[in-house]
């Protein structure tokens, strides 16, 4: 068996000895290497694409061919990198770092050559903005060259089966014509996209200044309002004070990386609805899965195709628009439901409203014991004749609103008002052992409320109040306008006790007096003849014990 090293074919067609990493070599180290190499490549290709767009729009047309070849050489570099550091090679320990470095020499020579040609043309045509972007391309190119020359490969391939070095690139680089690389499309001419995308505010989070500046400019050309942040911590601080529609998030950043930033965004109730598109040179499947599971909307590796990026931003913003619309509809539904429930509670007791919402259609309850109280303003017909209709209603609303507050405070149920009469019940719809005591306490508080009402208005209004305890029937009547009402002799007797009562002295029946005698001072009034009921013993309710 031969001891000679295996031979690998590189993308430029030269056979070179393959220096493979051992299966135990750190895949984490290779992952970082791939990220570091893709970062300047992303800048080189991105700025080349933007220059093509600029020259297509503004000229000079003579530069367009060389710019397209420049972009093609960048695409060829990306192809070499992707093939040499493919995931399956990392997993099987077959990464050929020395072959990768040599294979990138040809496309890098071509790229630098076309960059120099474009720079000369830009000087001739006095294209200041083009020269500025070519300067950024030059900076990114030098960064890539340093990564290939400064021993990084040897450091990251410590577990390789043999060491290797490579002489520095020659200072004289000879360009050769090269078509656009497979997998990297030429940038579309500005305005050529036929599918409009939503506008919005986008936050670009990337620690590389060139990456950030390139993305901000490209997004601005697409019509977006943009803001940049150098790391996740700054991004979260910015988002706490400014609204955004989408976040473009890098992963490998200092201070706070993309993973932690994404986790914090999705844990924040105020920010979790903002879509996050991961835009990173880290193109591993595990990283993609981790981000999507953490809540990222999409994952776009660098270098990116601007048309694809535009489409994915558009899709993410459209999803957000639909989700925002859905949340608005849900909020509107909840608001309308709350209004409906409030209206229902204004008409019906809560317990009855809950039963209706649960599907009960006929609600009729036989209540074995409850206390009904009626209150009426003495001589109200004569009083109302001295006021306008609006003034009369306003005064009634004022005093009855106070009675409503008292009934709620005492846990009693207001049934209705009939003109100047006020009807309330204790022990309905929910049973209460002390229903009579509650009603009696409210009677005195109603008298007190009327006293203060008179002081405010300089009136001398008085109340007649009657209370009676006994069985009754309670239920819903009506199919369009619901009404919760009470029926039975208990209701009738309470009404008669009120109408036969004395001003400002509550009158109660014998059964009610028996329930109140330990809590209130009562005075027997005697028997009164009630219509349809005959003689009934009554008591004056004087004061609490």
Image (cartoon, rainbow, N blue to C red):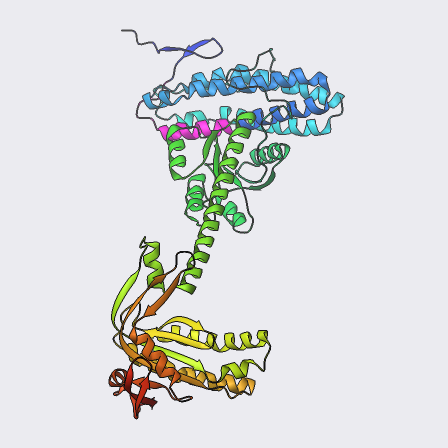
Instruction: Answer with left or right where residue 59 lies relative to residue 497.
Output: right
Residue 143: x and y in percent read: 55, 28
Image quadrant for the C terminus? Answer: bottom left
Q: Is residue 31 magenta?
A: yes
- Residue at the location (38% across, 87% down)? 501
Q: Is residue 150 visible?
A: no
Q: Is residue 283 left or right of residue 72?
A: left
The answer to whether residue 274 is left or right of residue 220 is left
Q: Residue furthest top?
A: 1
Residue 151 in the image: state x and y as whole percent: 46, 26
Majority secondary structure in the magenta region: helix
Check the image and report above or below for 157 versus 517. Answer: above
Q: Quadrant of the N terminus?
A: top left
Q: Nearer the viewer, residue 84 or 65?
A: 65
- Which stretch is magenta? 20-39
Residue at 58% in and 33% down: 215
Instruction: Please determine whether, in this image, residue 189 is positioned above or below residue 236.
Output: above
């Amino acid at each position: 068996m031969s001891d000679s090293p295996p031979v690998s074919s590189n993308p430029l067609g030269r056979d070179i000895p393959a220096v493979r990493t051992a299966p135990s070599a750190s895949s984490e180290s290779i992952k970082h290497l791939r990220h570091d190499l893709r970062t300047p490549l992303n800048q080189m290709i991105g700025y080349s694409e933007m220059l093509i767009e600029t020259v297509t729009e503004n000229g000079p047309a003579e530069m367009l061919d060389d710019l397209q070849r420049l972009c093609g050489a960048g695409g060829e570099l990306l192809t070499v990198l992707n093939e040499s550091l493919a995931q399956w090679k990392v997993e099987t320990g077959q990464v050929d770092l020395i072959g990768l470095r040599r294979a990138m020499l040809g496309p890098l020579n071509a790229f630098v050559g076309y960059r120099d040609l474009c720079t000369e043309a830009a000087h001739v045509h006095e294209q200041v903005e083009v020269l500025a972007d070519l300067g950024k391309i030059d900076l990114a190119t030098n960064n890539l060259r340093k990564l290939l020359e400064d021993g990084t490969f040897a450091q990251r391939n410590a577990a390789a089966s043999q060491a290797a070095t490579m002489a520095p690139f020659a200072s004289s680089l000879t360009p050769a014509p090269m078509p656009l690389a497979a997998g990297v499309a030429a940038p579309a001419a500005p305005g050529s996209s036929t599918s409009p995308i939503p506008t919005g505010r986008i936050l670009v989070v990337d620690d590389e200044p060139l990456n950030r500046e390139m993305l901000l400019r490209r997004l601005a050309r697409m019509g977006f309002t943009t803001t940049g942040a150098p790391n996740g911590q700054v991004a979260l601080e910015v988002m706490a004070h400014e609204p955004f529609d989408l976040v473009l998030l890098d992963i490998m950043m200092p201070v706070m990386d993309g993973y932690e930033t994404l986790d914090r965004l999705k844990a924040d109730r105020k920010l979790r609805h903002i879509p996050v598109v991961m835009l990173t040179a880290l193109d591993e499947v595990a990283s993609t899965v981790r981000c999507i599971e953490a809540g990222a909307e999409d994952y776009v590796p660098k270098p990116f195709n601007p048309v694809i990026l535009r489409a994915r931003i558009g899709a993410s913003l459209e999803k957000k628009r639909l989700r925002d619309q859905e949340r608005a509809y849900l909020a509107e539904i909840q608001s309308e439901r709350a209004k409906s429930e409030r209206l229902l509670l204004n008409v019906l007791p809560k317990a009855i409203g809950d039963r209706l919402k649960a599907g009960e259609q006929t609600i009729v309850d036989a209540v074995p014991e409850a206390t009904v109280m009626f209150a009426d303003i003495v001589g109200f017909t004569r009083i109302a004749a001295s006021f306008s209709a609006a003034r009369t209603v306003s005064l009634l609303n004022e005093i009855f609103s106070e009675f409503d507050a008292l009934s709620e405070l005492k846990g009693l149920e207001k049934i209705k008002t009939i003109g100047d009469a006020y009807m309330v019940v204790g022990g309905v719809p929910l049973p209460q052992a002390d229903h009579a005591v509650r009603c009696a306490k409210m009677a005195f508080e109603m008298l007190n409320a009327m006293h203060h009402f008179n002081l405010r208005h300089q009136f001398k209004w008085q109340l007649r109040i009657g209370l009676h305890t006994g069985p009754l029937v309670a239920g819903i009547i009506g199919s369009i306008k619901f009404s919760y009402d009470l029926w039975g002799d208990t209701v009738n007797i309470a009404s008669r006790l009120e109408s036969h009562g004395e001003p400002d002295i509550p009158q109660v029946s014998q059964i009610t007096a028996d329930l109140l005698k330990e809590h209130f001072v009562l005075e027997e009034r005697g028997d009164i003849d009630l219509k349809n009921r005959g003689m009934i013993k009554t008591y004056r309710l004087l004061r609490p014990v």
